[in-house]
Image (tube, rainbow, N blue to C red):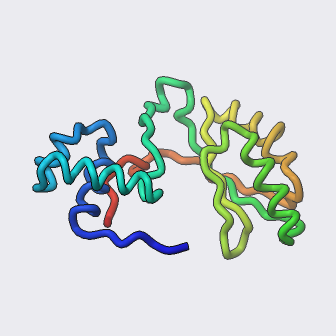
Amino acid sequence: MNRVKLDSFDHAILRHIAVNGRMSVTELSDRIGLTKSPTQSRLRRLEEQGVILGYRAQIDPNQIDAAHIAFVEIKLSDTREAALRAFNEAVRTVPEIEECHLIAGAFDYLLKVRSRDIASYRQVLAEHISSLPHITSTSTHVVMEAVKETGAQPAF
């Protein structure tokens, strides 16, 4: 896979739309110091080249009963490719699992799980997560406060 070459204007566009994806092209062009037409062309190119994968709404988890966050360490009994594929496919079917990362270290996967409260998390763990293929053990870390989450300005 060839990486796309980005200049300082491209990076500026990405920084601004990462914070506000609904920013108008006019406002974006004012902020990065280009006129509207080249800004729009650059934005379109970044989308076509797959640098910008899409746009999404940032939802308040308190408004949708998903404010409880738990991180779950998963240890698998089998880490051959077929087992990893089976686990990955099964994880994608559990809506409460917001993120899933294959990890190098003392455990195999780290999950970010959102639920209404600890009781609903316990149910998700018992009924969905624990039944995922090849799990040997889980360890849960409950979040007390989200200090920084997606939506903040990226460091590039």
Q: Is residue 58 above or below residue 44?
A: above
Q: Is residue 139 left or right of residue 63?
A: right
* Residue in front for this viewpoint, 6 or 154: 6
The C terminus sits in image quarter: bottom left
Residue 106: x percent and y percent? 71, 74
Question: Residue at position x 60%, y 29% from top?
Answer: 116
Q: Is residue 121 left or right of residue 83?
A: left
Q: Is residue 56 left or right of residue 30?
A: right
In which quarter of the view is residue 136 placed? Answer: bottom right
Question: So how many labels did they put on this image?
Answer: 0
Question: Residue at position x 31%, y 36% from top?
Answer: 22
Q: Is residue 126 left or right of residue 52?
A: right
Q: Is residue 149 above or below residue 56?
A: below
Residue 66: x percent and y percent? 56, 32
Residue 147: x percent and y percent? 39, 50
Question: Residue at position x 75%, y 40% from top?
Answer: 93
* Residue in front for this viewpoint, 43 or 92: 43
Question: Residue at position x 50%, y 45% from top?
Answer: 144
* Residue in front for this viewpoint, 20 or 64: 20
The N terminus sits in image quarter: bottom right
Q: Is residue 82 above or below residue 113?
A: below
Residue 135: x percent and y percent? 85, 57
* Residue in front for this viewpoint, 49 or 102: 49
